[in-house]
Amino acid sequence: MTRCDLSLGFVGLGALGLPMAVNLQRAGVSLRVHTRSRGAETDPQLAGARPCDNPATTAENVDVLLLCVSDDNAVHDVLFGRDGAAEQLQPGSIVIDCSTISPKGAQQAAAQLKQNGVHYLDAPVTGGTEGARAGSLTVLVGGDAAVLEKVRPLLEVIGGSIHHIGPVGRGQQAKAVNQVLVAGSYAAVAEAIALGQRLELPMPQVIDALKSGAAGSWALNHRSEAMLQGHYPLGFKLSLHHKDLCIALETANSVELDMPITALVEQLETDLIQQGYGDDDVSALHRWNAAMEEA
């Protein structure tokens, strides 16, 4: 089965969801779309897709429903709330959940959908808005391998690499590991830049030199310039990453693992969110160091 043979409903047209949906539309997928704010449904890039009033309408007569929403509560509401998609999903259809939620939330959604004969894959993505626009996201999939193969043509449109991690919930666990790494790397880049600035080093040249060495990272390559400029264009909201870190810390707690570095970054993010920076990109972690400079 090719991607053009599959009819798709898409719920959640945010910073990641909209470019993902645009790429699917351009690939010739029959697409129904819905987002809570309703505005992005009529984005010119989605010309030809059918805007829908609610998740239930979006799920009518589709083979696959793809979600890219904010958290556990949003997933539950989209699937099982008022005008939820579950009331329209047909037996044998597949939900691909690209949201980042708790492993337990993914397992609960899968169990509830299974009662109606609907398959569920937890498939969180990583790669930022750059990866979403380029169709090069990394997709971490939990669920039945045979179900994954049915929808692989769709995932290959949005993802440059697709990884089957194990049963439902394993994709979210892998994403938690990813977000721990992201937290440490962003915080380290922010702190390193603060040190270089305090030393009055020519930081653009220093960063260019370090990118190809052992200190090279996605955060250094893609977010150091924003930190130097004190300008944080949205790639991934700080508030959403904070939510992901809380999931990672809860997951670690469930296996009695302490993660002091992650806990520290979570507290730094809490401080910044309380200061009103929750809608900035994660690279706004540098604001914390800048504030210390001014103090």
Image (cartoon, rainbow, N blue to C red):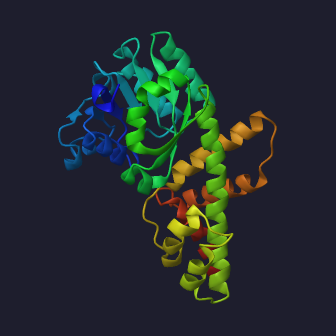
| Residue 194 in the image: above or below residue 254 | below
Residue 173 screen position, x and y as percent:
64, 37
Q: Hey, which quadrant is residue 198 in on the image?
A: bottom right
Look at 45% across and 11% down and name the residue there.
117
Look at 23% across and 48% down and name the residue there.
45
Name the one closer to the observer, 3 or 95.
3
Q: Is residue 201 visible?
A: yes
Residue 116 screen position, x and y as percent:
45, 10
Quarter of the rendering occupied by the N terminus = top left
Quarter of the rendering occupied by the C terminus = bottom right
Residue 78 screen position, x and y as percent:
41, 28
Q: Is residue 67 visible?
A: no
Residue 257 screen position, x and y as percent:
80, 42
Name the one closer to the observer, 200 or 139.
139
| Residue 290 in the image: above or below residue 4 | below
Q: Hey, which quadrant is residue 5 in on the image?
A: top left
| Residue 196 in the image: above or below residue 63 | below
Q: Is residue 29 left or right of residue 280?
A: left
Q: Is residue 225 left or right of residue 92?
A: right
| Residue 292 in the image: above or below residue 263 | below
Q: Is residue 170 left or right of residue 240?
A: right
Q: How many marks?
A: 0
* Residue lying farthest to the front in this orientation: 1
Q: Hey, which quadrant is residue 3 in on the image?
A: top left
Look at 44% across and 53% down and name the residue there.
131
Look at 66% across and 72% down and name the residue there.
191
